[in-house]
Amino acid sequence: MDFPAIELHTHSPAETQALAARVALALPPETVLLPLTGELGGGKTTFVQGLARALGITRTVGSPSFLLMKEYHEGARPLRHIDLYRITGAREIAPLGLLEDIAEGTVVVVEWADRVALELHAPVVALHFAALDGENSRRLTVTLRNGASLKGVADALRAD
Amino acid sequence: MLCALIDTSGQNMLLGLAEETGRLAAAAAPPHTKENSAAIAELFARMLADAGVWPDELTHLGIGCGPGSFIGTRTGLAFANGYAAGRNLPVIALNSLRSAGVIALTMAEGSAIFRAARKRSYYAGLYRADTLEAGREMELADEVAFAMLESGFTGLPEVPVQVVTDCRRLYDRAQETKLPPRYSVVLKDNVADLRGLAILAGRALRAGTTAPWADAVYLRPAVD
């Protein structure tokens, strides 16, 4: 089941993180894929930081541009953070199994998800980040796919 | 327990962190450049820093021992042994070929891994889930490898087999040959698999089959 795209605006990193927290708390309990796209400095990592904090992860979550994948297990549910910024083709990441061996209930976030097509049989919360006029203003376009269980996310985001 | 992983036996350097469960906690594959072998210490330090892990948090070092690129493997081993000695870390010798075998076994009951070696030959490993630890690696001339592929693998009769290779020539030959439907053939740039290395490291950690750094394997595991 797919949902109509939802467009949202934030005006500061704190607002982006608060939005991420709302998404985190509304996610269904099964494994979910969050592909993030948008230009450099668009707020993707800020979003992931807000998501991680809402999941109870206390370690600093940075932009793992050297690391392609980092997994956090200390929160309410596992978070796998993948960053494909440096990647130019699927063959580069083949030996890493980035979407393999995923524990049930993991939140899988993929920054620069448009660099390589990654397939995962799971509900998808896709977010596109666009910078607007003004240093910290962002437009987020959220697309929900592959799951009736995402209704809670849709409701939480439409509550604005 | 937290085990750092290093494998330089293939085209790309693989760096990561494995937990006792065999779970891969962090993964990096620096872009392939000629300078990577000189920068291995810096790349390793950067991997730890990006993962938010202090060197003191490492309890073991897992080293990909090939078989694979002779110079590449030796470079990684030299660094890993030096690092382990400096920090007094026990090491785990990991078979790079078997790391691919264990991952291919998640797709089929049997796996056959062919890694290009020098002089038109291959390092080959045949694995089944129930005999993985007893898996046997060998070096084969290319015609022997082709014949083995075309006639079926004696050690893997009547089971689905995933064949993994980094050699275009062998891959093309497999495509041209009418292989039984139980075979699937995969071409990869780098046969070594970081998630497979993590699984093997996890098994070694749980079994306690690690070694003091002084006993570290200095070159690839025995290949007949």
Image (spheres, rainbow, N blue to C red):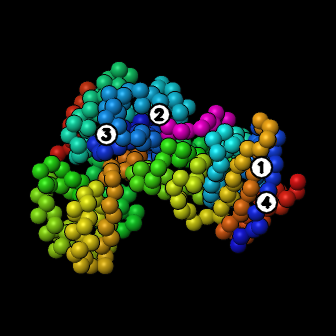
The image quadrant of residue B114 is: bottom left
First reached walking from the N terminus: tag 4 or tag 1: 4
**Do labels 2 and 1 touch, CB within 8 Å?**
no
The location of residue B147, given as percent across then percent down, is: 13, 69
Magenta span main SS: loop
Checking the image for residue B47, the label placed there is: 2
The relative height of residue A18 versus residue B145 in the rendered view (above or below) is above
Inter-mark Cα distance, 2 to 3: 15 Å
Q: List x then y, in percent, for residue A2.
A: 71, 70
Q: Give the quadrant of residue A74.
A: top right
Residue at which label 1 appears: A139
Q: Which residue is mark 3?
A: B8
Which secondary structure lies at badge 1? strand
Residue linked to disc 4: A6
Question: Mark 1 or mark 3, which is nearer to you?
Answer: 1
User: CB under 8 Å between callouts 4 and 1?
Assistant: no
Visible residue check, residue B84: no
Give the residue displayed 40% in from the left and 47% down from the top. Answer: B194
